[in-house]
């Protein structure tokens, strides 16, 4: 059922980030860029600062899947409360898939 | 049948054990019989808590079975149901309650705390299980099963439902509907889409506004069908949506363009499902591009049918036919009402000519609550002036071109710029504020504001946004602020908001 969009487009974002996935700072920087592009600004507090609402959360989760290859089903709104919590979540998924591969 | 309660009670008599409302989260379903019994008992509970016929009963709950128990319970006792958005800011709710003067506010566990902060004169009552200190609670599951008494007689043309929208002056606008206007609308929806008791509608739109409540939910109950009720569209809903549609054998559901766009985005990542029983999907509340309609149909293999309506007309007045040859640039064909375009002098225009759209018919509102002046301005000889600009062709197909009213439609929800301006101007550092809608690929429009600071005053974008968040519902808050030294005005001192959009070009 699942189809990795990035793979379909001829690249593998998970592989792309795999080598750097142990470095949480790299993940954070990339997420910051995505948030800035999608939401117009980036702050530590994503929900509290009003950057993220229920609709934008969907869009961001889908973008994270496209960019990192992490399944959006694994990401919850609670993970998106702050940039740090979101980074930790994405990083932990990447690490897990890294370990499994 | 001329009473909403009686219409649904009729199904309870004939198909008592049929599933009426099925919560998508797996909670137990309500049968028609159970819904009607619980609603009648809740009506008596309201009466026991001081509500009398014709009193307003605000319903501040989320998308739950209890919402419908409360709504029908109020109608059973001849009261006026006032569904309100529990996500509004406290000050917005205070304005609505000051305007509607409800005798009771029905809350659930998730809204009780906010309702208490609002501090209205109306009594707080709770529906649903769970202890809420100091608030009388009606637990539908624990209700004693007795045959429901017939509803209080109420003229079909009398006020029954009060739906709040914001006004262009920033004041709340209470749109008054009767049993007759609502029943006329759900009847036309049922006829147009050939809905039957075999249909199962899925609702992921908020139940407190016309599109979700009347078109998606009440139309399902009107014809004895089943309503699969989800919480409003969010990340959790989207994760389970297609599985839920398939498992619940859903035959149709309604959307707004933002939902359509997100489902298309999702389809790029997951193989699109083809739920076997899904007959069609509708989309309303904001314009959708032809390319998006076609992409949705190709992706999901199901017709996406545009509809057009406004709260003041009990929602949809134009419907797209379920036919592959339909004009996809049209928002639908007028049905159950008349739609015409008029010139600036109010003269009806020939088919195909562009002008303001006006609507006349049995589902047009009774007027605005406590606002005769606005009512007489907007309702002229039975014609409701929509503030939308477009045309009606010789076949009755309606095309929308633009809006004459200053309203921003963000993800299908109306945001009135003056509402936001008023909140911005309450900030001590701001001298002028002009809210505008910016094109947004996903949301349709996003909210932004151009502001002028008072001389010597300092306020950062963050401070101003924080100020707005305390006073406005999240979807109304500006996402961007542009500071300028002055704003150009015309000879009458008016500002052309359209021109201000260019300030956000970079």
Image (cartoon, grey):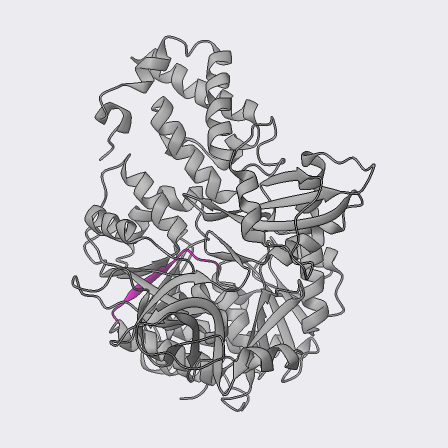
Residue at image point 33% right, 59% down: B253
Mainly helix, strand or loop, the magenta region? loop
Residue A92's x, y, as percent?
A: 44, 19
Residue at image point 51% right, 88% down: B157
Q: Quadrant of the C terminus of chain A?
A: top left
Residue B145 seen in this snapshot: no
Foreground pick, B181 / B107: B181
Residue at image point 65% right, 66% down: B172
Position of residue B137 relative to residue B261, above or below, is: below
Residue B234's x, y, as percent?
A: 45, 46
Queried whether the magenta region covers residue B244, the answer comes back as: no
Quarter occupied by residue B1: bottom left
Position of residue A20 relative to residue B283, above or below, is: above
Numbered range of the magenta stretch = B196-206
Q: Quadrant of the N terminus of chain A?
A: top left
Foreground pick, B123 / B476: B476
Residue B267's x, y, as percent?
A: 28, 40
Position of residue B493 relative to residue B355, above or below, is: above
Foreground pick, A90 / B139: A90
Queried whether the magenta region covers residue B202, the answer comes back as: yes
Q: From the viewer's perspective, is B443 left or right of B85? A: left
């Amino acid at each position: 059922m699942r189809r990795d969009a990035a793979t379909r487009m001829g690249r593998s974002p998970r592989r792309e980030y795999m080598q750097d996935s142990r470095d949480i700072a790299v993940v954070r920087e990339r997420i910051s860029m995505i948030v800035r592009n999608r939401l117009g600004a980036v702050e530590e507090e994503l929900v509290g600062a009003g950057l993220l609402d229920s609709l934008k959360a969907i869009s961001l989760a889908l973008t994270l899947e496209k960019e990192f290859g992490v399944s959006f089903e694994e990401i919850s709104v609670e993970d998106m409360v702050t940039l740090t919590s979101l980074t930790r979540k994405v990083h932990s998924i990447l690490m897990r898939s890294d370990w499994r591969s | 049948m001329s009473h909403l309660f009686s219409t649904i009670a009729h199904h309870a008599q004939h198909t008592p054990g049929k599933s009426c409302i099925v919560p998508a989260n797996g909670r137990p379903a309500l049968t028609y019989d159970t819904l009607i019994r619980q609603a009648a008992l809740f009506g008596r509970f309201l009466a026991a808590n001081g509500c009398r016929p014709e009193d307003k009963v605000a319903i501040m709950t989320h998308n739950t079975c209890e919402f419908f128990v409360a709504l029908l319970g109020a109608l059973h006792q001849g009261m006026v149901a006032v569904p309100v958005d529990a996500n509004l800011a406290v000050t917005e709710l205070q304005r609505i309650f000051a305007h509607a003067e409800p005798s009771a506010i029905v809350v659930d566990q998730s809204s009780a705390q906010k309702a208490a902060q609002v501090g209205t004169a109306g009594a707080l009552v709770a529906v649903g299980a769970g202890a809420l200190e100091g608030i009388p609670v009606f637990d539908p599951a624990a209700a004693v099963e007795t045959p429901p008494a017939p509803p209080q007689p109420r003229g079909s043309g009398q006020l029954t439902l009060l739906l709040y929208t914001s006004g262009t002056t920033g004041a709340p606008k209470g749109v008054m509907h009767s049993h007759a206007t609502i029943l006329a609308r759900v009847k036309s929806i049922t006829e147009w889409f050939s809905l039957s008791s075999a249909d199962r509608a899925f609702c992921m739109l908020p139940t407190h506004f016309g599109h979700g409540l009347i078109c998606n939910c009440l139309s399902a109950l009107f014809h004895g069908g089943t309503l699969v009720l989800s919480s409003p569209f969010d990340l959790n809903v989207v994760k389970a949506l297609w599985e839920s549609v398939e498992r619940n054998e859903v035959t149709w559901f309604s959307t707004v363009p933002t939902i359509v766009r997100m489902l298309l985005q999702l389809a790029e990542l997951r193989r699109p499902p083809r739920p076997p029983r899904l007959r069609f999907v509708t989309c309303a509340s904001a314009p959708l591009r032809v390319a998006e309609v076609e992409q949705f149909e190709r992706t999901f293999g199901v017709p996406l049918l545009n509809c057009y309506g406004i709260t003041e007309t009990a929602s949809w007045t134009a419907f797209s036919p379920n036919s592959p040859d339909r004009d996809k640039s049209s928002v639908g064909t007028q049905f159950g009402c008349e739609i015409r375009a008029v010139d600036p002098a109010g003269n009806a225009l020939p088919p195909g000519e562009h002008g303001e759209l006006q609507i006349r018919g049995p589902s047009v509102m009774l007027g605005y609550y406590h606002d005769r002046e606005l009512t007489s301005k907007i309702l002229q000889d039975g014609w409701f002036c929509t503030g939308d600009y477009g045309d009606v062709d010789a076949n009755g197909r309606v095309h929308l071109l633009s809006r004459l009213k200053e309203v921003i439609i963000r993800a299908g929800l109306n945001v009135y710029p003056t509402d936001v301006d008023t909140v911005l101007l309450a900030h001590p550092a701001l001298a002028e504020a002009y809210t505008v809608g910016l094109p947004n690929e996903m949301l349709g429009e996003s909210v932004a504001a151009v502001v002028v600071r008072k001389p010597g005053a300092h306020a950062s974008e963050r401070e101003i946004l924080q100020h707005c968040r305390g006073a406005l519902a999240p979807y109304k808050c500006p996402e961007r602020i542009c500071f300028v030294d002055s704003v150009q005005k015309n000879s009458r001192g008016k500002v052309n908001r359209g021109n201000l959009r260019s300030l956000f070009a970079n």
